[in-house]
Every structure is written in structure tokens, then in C-alpha cells.
Image (cartoon, rainbow, N blue to C red):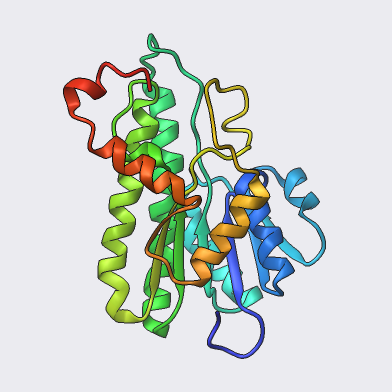
């Protein structure tokens, strides 16, 4: 929670739909001052009353410092930042497309870094704050189906751990979230998905994890077991698995 008077300020990047939108509504229901950002303004408008919103493309990293200045000027110091933006284009085993790979890395990694670089030093100077990112169990191993996406989430995991180690002595908390399968536009139409959580259920558990100051959290505990198993499958077996 915020250590200042009044409600905490929560900024959610990638909040037009799915987990990000559900997080915005969940924190607003708690009484937080919520600021939502995404590319699609028409969807941000539908988040509901009391949620401030700004149109922002996370691939425009150069715009982030000035945007953070604007947010803190209009809404006060940011207590919590959640980076929920993500891209996972549909591909096939025959897809070798550097343009799509670039989109994934710019959205999932470089956009994340831009926002963390803009807010981390401010939080460190204030001696408080919380940085969180939505990662994925896909970052635990390199899977044949989504090479760039797996790479981006592995990078997210390592980057957030590095921030945690850098900022822990400065009073700033850092949380990495691995949701598992959630009913969103990203998973719609994908085959063989199981243990699907709704965006609202995932948001409730993510809010709980962030508020508890968790370091790394699989949203549903059973995914932690799955992750443990996947990480320990020998490579000569894993490469033959259709996952």
C-alpha cells in the first residue's frame, strides 16, 4: 500500500483488455487511484468510472519519460506499476518472420524496460514503490511453437530478478507474475489449453500477490508444479515433446 496520505496510485500498462483491464477494475474496486494505458482508446473508455486513461503504444519507448512526468504531475507519485502489455502473434512451425519477432521483443521486453527505467529511479529516490510485470510459464523453457515469445518471457524473468536485486536495498519491491492459461484475446483459439482461469480470477490473485510483496508468483499454485516439472525435463526428451 502507499505510504503517503490518500489512495495509492496504480499505473497499468496494457490495460485495454484481458488481465490488464481486469487489474484496473480490481484495484479501482479497492479504492486505488488507477491510471490505465494502452493503444486502443475506445477500449480504455469502457473500463468504467474513476479510472484515468491515456493512449500509449509501448513500442514508442522514447515517449515514456515525458509520459511518466505527465502522469505523476496529474495523479501524484506512482506507488505501483504493472506492465501487462504483451504480443504473441499466431505462427506456425514454418514461420520465420523477423518482423513479427521484432514486434514481440519490442512489446514484451523493450517496452517493459522503458517503463521500468522511467519509474525505478523515482521510486528508489523516494525509498518506496512496487514494480510488477506479467510474464509467463512460457519463459521457463524454449518451446518449439513460440520461439520469440518464449525468449521474451525468459528475458522478462531475468530482467525483473535483476531489478529486484538492484532495488531491494532501496525500499522498492519487484514482482514477477506467471499467470498460466487465462481467458484472453491472446489465448483465444489456441488448442489443448487446460486449467483456464478467467481474467477476473487471475486479476484477483495477482492483486493479492502484489499486495503481499511476492517476488515470483504463479497465479494458480498448480502451475508452480507444472513449471518445476517442465524445467527439469531433459533436453533430449523436451525437444521431442509437442509443446
Q: Position of residue 211 (x, y in %)?
A: 52, 71
Q: Position of residue 31 (x, y in %)?
A: 71, 75
With respect to residue 224, does 102 lie above or below? above
Give the number of marks.
Answer: 0
Q: Horizontally, is 74 left or right of 125 in the view? A: right
Residue found at the far top of this picture = 94
Q: Quadrant of the C terminus?
A: top left
With respect to residue 135, does 126 lie above or below? below
Q: Position of residue 224 (x, y in %)?
A: 39, 48
Q: Which residue is painted at 65% across and 64% down in the image?
A: 35
Whether residue 16 can be seen here: yes
Q: Position of residue 137 (x, y in %)?
A: 40, 41
Decide which of 191, 76 is in the foreground and name it.
Answer: 191
Whether residue 15 can be seen here: no
Q: Which residue is painted at 65% across and 44% down in the image?
A: 198
Q: Quadrant of the N terminus?
A: bottom right
With respect to residue 133, does 122 lie above or below? below
Q: Which residue is painted at 26% across and 69% down in the image?
A: 166
Q: Horizontally, is 110 left or right of 38 in the view? A: left
Q: Which residue is painted at 38% across and 75% down in the image?
A: 172
Amino acid at each position: 500500500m502507499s505510504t503517503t496520505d490518500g489512495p495509492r496510485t496504480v499505473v497499468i500498462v496494457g490495460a485495454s483488455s484481458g488481465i490488464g483491464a481486469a487489474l484496473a477494475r480490481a484495484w479501482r474496486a479497492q479504492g486505488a487511484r488507477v491510471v490505465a494505458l494502452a493503444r486502443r482508446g475506445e477500449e480504455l473508455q469502457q473500463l468504467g468510472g474513476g479510472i484515468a486513461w491515456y493512449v500509449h503504444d509501448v513500442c514508442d519507448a522514447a515517449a515514456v519519460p515525458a509520459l511518466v512526468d505527465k502522469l505523476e504531475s496529474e495523479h501524484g507519485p506512482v506507488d505501483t506499476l504493472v506492465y501487462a502489455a504483451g504480443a504473441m502473434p499466431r505462427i506456425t512451425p514454418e514461420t520465420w518472420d523477423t518482423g513479427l519477432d521484432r514486434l514481440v521483443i519490442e512489446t514484451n521486453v523493450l517496452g517493459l524496460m522503458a517503463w521500468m527505467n522511467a519509474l525505478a529511479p523515482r521510486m528508489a529516490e523516494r525509498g518506496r514503490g512496487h514494480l510488477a510485470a506479467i510474464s509467463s510459464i512460457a519463459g521457463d523453457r524454449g518451446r518449439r511453437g513460440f520461439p520469440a515469445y518464449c525468449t521474451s518471457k525468459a528475458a522478462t524473468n531475468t530482467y525483473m530478478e535483476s531489478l529486484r536485486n538492484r532495488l531491494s536495498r532501496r525500499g522498492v519491491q519487484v514482482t514477477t507474475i506467471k499467470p498460466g492459461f487465462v481467458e484472453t484475446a491472446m489465448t483465444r483459439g489456441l488448442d489443448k489449453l487446460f486449467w483456464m482461469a478467467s481474467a477476473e480470477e487471475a486479476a484477483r490473485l495477482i492483486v493479492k500477490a502484489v499486495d503481499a510483496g511476492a517476488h515470483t508468483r504463479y497465479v494458480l499454485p498448480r502451475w508452480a508444479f507444472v513449471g518445476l516439472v517442465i524445467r527439469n525435463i531433459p533436453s533430449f526428451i523436451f525437444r521431442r515433446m509437442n509443446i
